[in-house]
Image (cartoon, grey):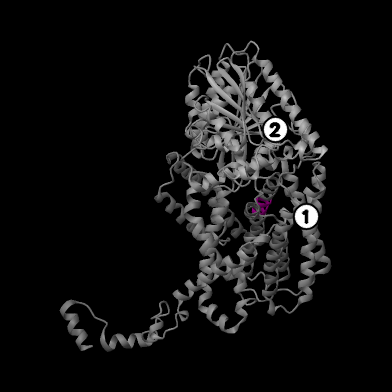
Amino acid sequence: MERGSNNNNNNGTIPLEGDFMERIFDVCVERGKSYMHSKGLLRRDDPLDYVLPLTLFQIFLSVLMSRLVYFVLRPIRTPKFGGILLGPSGLTHIQTFRTLMYPSRQYEILFVTASIAISYFIFILSMKMDTRMNLKSIKRTWRFGLFPFLTSFWVMSALTCLFYHGPGIPGLADEEMKRVRMAVLVTTSMASFPVMSEGLLELNLIASELGQIALSASMLNEIMQLMIQAVVTVLHNKNSEYRMAFMFCYTSFVLFCFYVIRPAAIRIARGTPPGKQVSEGFVVMIQLGVLVTAFLCDALGMSFVQGPLVMGLVMPSGPPLATTLEERTEAIIANLLLPAFFFFLGGRIDLLAIKTWGIIFKVQLILMAGFVAKIVACVVISLRYKMKFKHGIVLGLMLNMKGMVDLIIFSRMRTLEMMDDQIYAHMVLSVMGVATIVSPLIELLYNPQSRVDKLSEISMNMMKTIQTTPRNSELRIISCVHKEGEVHSIIALMESLNPINSSMCVYVLHLIQLLGKSTPILRHINISKNKSWLLMNYPDTHHIMRAFHNFAHNSNQNQGCSSFVSVVPCINVAPYKTMHDSICNLAQDKCVPLIVLPFHQNDHTHDHCTAAAIRSLNASIQEYAPCTVGILVDKYSRLSISSNINTTSSSLSFFSSLFHVGVFFMGGADDREALALAMRMSEHKNIKIVLLRLVMRGKKTSKDDESGELDEEEREERRLDESLIDEFKALEFGNPQVAMEDVEVEGWEKVFDGIRKWEWKYDLVMVGRKHKKGCFNDEEMSSFEENVEMLGMVGDMLASSEFCNGIVPVLVVQCGGKRLRGQSGREASVEI
């Protein structure tokens, strides 16, 4: 102390060093002992005795276990619940492992880590909800959201009153126990929107018709659950002052989110340049806002997840804000921190601690009764809507989906001691069991290509093709566009197909991958009324639709043409895996005979993953489309250049010079459809059509090798080919813009030699995807493999660099899709 006094006199401070420093630490903590960091294995210090290395190891182990279980059980679509297996019922049943992984001092750290993960997880899920769109669809499907919930709730409530008289939870009065049971019954009866969205995405059913109905029903359930929670929280406390204070605080918080946070978020989204991401400063500010809202709700006595939930609901979904937040936040939360929540859940579940298995068995029977009651209610309502019986069962299974949100609710109830360990363990395992059973059953029973409406199902066999569409009737076309660079080529093709003496209706679909949303969109848009929404979320859509409207306006101003062109602008936001469902359903509902798709290599700005996804989408549409499908290959946008298109002018013709179209014909339903399409183009005075009929020599006819039944089939195919060619020849009389030439070839090499003779003579080349039997053998088909499955043998050759260096646009036509392939003769193609 004397030395300390001298030092104090010298510089005015008292240094804590030497023996005095050591004595202080001897009193406070063990000398030299730190519970945060390990000194290392080299100093014989066990790292799992310290907080930081143990926490990191727990996160690593939970992620590893979740991924491992998910990979093993992926065929049955099991959610990522693997971390729960690390609890006392799993590996932690081993005493050594339990001592290492679940020390008492780690509980608070695990709880905080899991709570942060849950907060961001709930925020991301609620932000993806397109509340406005789902509220509109609720008007049509509210019965599926209300009556199955009420039926399940009433059945379980009645059975609980009759058969369940289990022991109460220590410390809870009878009134409190009734409230707990009510909360459990409401939770198990409800269908959670985030769980529904994640489950349907996993099953690739989110864009299906039943998936859309289930999403709308779960959104109604979500709204009902929020209202019930608010009312119960207010009525539970009998103190009137507390009620008023709680209502004031909760209402103020919600109003603050709607009238302060939402306008600020919309301003940020609108201020972001088109095609760009939101600046990092705004992203960090919103991410911090999630923690602030969670803190406020917890401070007010509410569940901390209410804050991120409400904040996510008021955020504008879709690009650019939601997509940027999802990209910056979701990966680390879902893949690293969220498994810590399952690890936390697993530490609370101990099946060996369950003693009253009889009561657990009764609870399970009650839950199963509610499960079945919801399915029965869905079946009854589906019959009211004239849906199939099987579709009602599938819809009931969808509304019984359980997942993360249910686990969060039960975990909070356990934290608040509203459940004991036995009931809590049983409820968590019930969620896991239902999630494991429901998904495989849905995948087994539901085919997304089958229509919900019975009338639509009947019309599935009524194929619309170009040949079956009268020339004096309206020609309807679905034109799909991914990016602006494809617009001019598609418009040039539409102008060439524009009939002279009848009208044409073009359904323009801008196809956008589902990002920043959990609800797919297929809606008609008005570019004037929806201008602000489009410019903020999808600016490219606005520009694309403006170009097509200019095309229709210019065509209708053409005084030399009596036809009328109408454009129906639509936007289709969905995952690429399921986007074909909505396109095929639209084609069927609108009786569209032709779908035009851009080739996946047309736009060179697509990255490899996007190009592969578009290729898969085109293949799915070819497989399931109920009409003719045309794939336009125009890698260098030559079609718009050749036609000299000007979408802003009002000239009498889009084709200022003669436009040459060549059609390669070898026979078969697809080639006939391509020829029928070319015959429609022949009505234009500035379009010249040349039919190049490839006649194979040196091929054995099936008459020498096959049975009489097959000979009859080939004769019918040949008759249909000749009939359509005769009709085309009739167009030659008095029309110098129509010509036909027979090209005799022999063998595979000769076919392509014959095709190469016609290089650089056409602005557009058309061909069928497949040809009549016997044209090519397996050995010949192995010569071209790049896109032969999608474009066919000749189409792949025409689109490759072997023909005109791949510059000339090619339209590959397929007649009728999946249902017409494999059918013969008259069933596969009908004459005009």
For this view, does 21 lie left or right of residue 555?
A: left
Please state which of residues 398 and 449 is positioned toward the viewer in this rendering: 449
For this view, does 190 lie left or right of residue 358?
A: left
* Crowding at mark 2 (Cα within 10 Å: few <14, some 14-19, many 20+): many
Q: In the picture shown, does residue 317 fall above or below 509?
A: below
Query: What is the residue that sits farthest to the right in this orientation?
Result: 162
How far across and down, in percent of the image, does residue 531 sit? 52, 32
Label 2: state its secondary structure: loop
Residue 596 in view (yes/no): yes
Residue 9 within the magenta-colored segment of the rendering: no
Query: What is the residue that sits farthest to the left in this orientation?
Result: 10
- Quarter in which the C terminus is drawn: top right
Q: Amino acid at mark 2?
A: Gly
Tag nearer the camera, 2 or 1:
2
Residue at x-position 76% and y-position 63% = 367
Please state which of residues 627 and 394 is positioned toward the viewer in this rendering: 627
Label 1: state its secondary structure: helix
